[in-house]
Image (tube, rainbow, N blue to C red):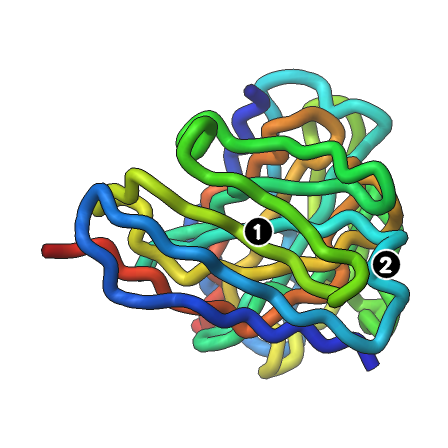
Amino acid sequence: EIVLTQSPGTLSLSPGERATLSCRASHSVSSSHLAWYQQRPGQAPRLLIHHASGRATGVPDRFSGGGSGTDFTLTISRLEPEDFAVYFCQQYGTSPYTFGQGTKLEIK
Amino acid sequence: EVQLLESGGDLVQPEGSVRLSCAASGFTFSIYAMSWVRQAPGKGLEWVSSISGIGGNTYYADSVKGRFTISRDNSKNRLYLQMSSLRAEDTAVYYCAKHLVLVTASPGDHWGQGTLVTVSS
């Protein structure tokens, strides 16, 4: 099983600032099959990034993903009020398709 | 517009059973992989099970293997999760998710709003 470790657990920033979230895998993620999701309180997860760097349909271009192998990042270039939420990474290259524990992005 | 509507969540006694259903619309259901993902109260996401489109290959998390069964009825555009031998740690909101493509090695690009399963005596 591939274990995904996200850091930091909580990130406190202000609107307009840049956010960088990390997702580290215990083993290499095949074919960069790594996704990022956003979850706002009381809502279902929303796909942001697939294949490590591909933006999902309708996702603003301030969201970008990068990395390969075991180290991946999600960057939000300029935070908007609606971006404060919990973010999860998931690897879907090898079953079981595991999730990271999440990073909470909160307003400073 | 893609819509996924879960149902079947309930209060269930330990060792009991329940079947979740997900009604899909707005896309050609049969050619997309589907999954169940759960979230215990106040916790993170946990992948539970996936089923591919067309051929219906299935995959399970170790925590549910042998107790849960995923299936799909492409004629009814429905996804199911039969859950048995339920434990307290199965208490969670269960989300139905449509995958981006036919195979399960793809992310979930549309999610339902979830259905709550509570396992308690």
Residue B112 position, x and y percent, is 61, 70
Please, what secondary structure does the residue beneath circle 2 have? strand
| Residue A56 seen anywhere in this rendered image of the structure | yes
Q: Residue at x 67, y 35 (%)?
A: A91
Q: Residue at x 65, y 42 (%)?
A: B50
Cα distance, mark 1 to mark 2?
A: 23 Å
Image position of B81 (left or right of A76): left
Q: Which mark is residue A55?
A: 2
Q: Which mark is residue B36?
A: 1
Q: Which mark is residue B105?
A: none
Q: Which quadrant of the figure has residue B18?
A: bottom left
Question: How packed is label 1: few (under 14 Cα within 10 Å), some, or many (20 or more)?
Answer: many
Tell me if label 1 and label 2 are in contact, CB under 8 Å. Answer: no
Image quarter in which the C terminus of chain B is found? bottom left
For the residue pair A100 and A44, the one nearer the viewer reads as A44
Residue type highlighted by circle 2: Arg
Residue type highlighted by circle 1: Trp
| Residue A102 seen anywhere in this rendered image of the structure | no
How many numbered markers are drawn? 2
Image quarter in which the N terminus of chain B is found? bottom right
For the residue pair B121 and A70, the one nearer the viewer reads as B121
Image position of A29 (left or right of B22): right
- Please state the chain letter of the residue tagged with numbered disc 2 in the rendered image: A
Residue B116 position, x and y percent, is 37, 66
Q: Residue at x 57, y 19 (%)?
A: A26
Question: How packed is label 2: few (under 14 Cα within 10 Å), some, or many (20 or more)?
Answer: some
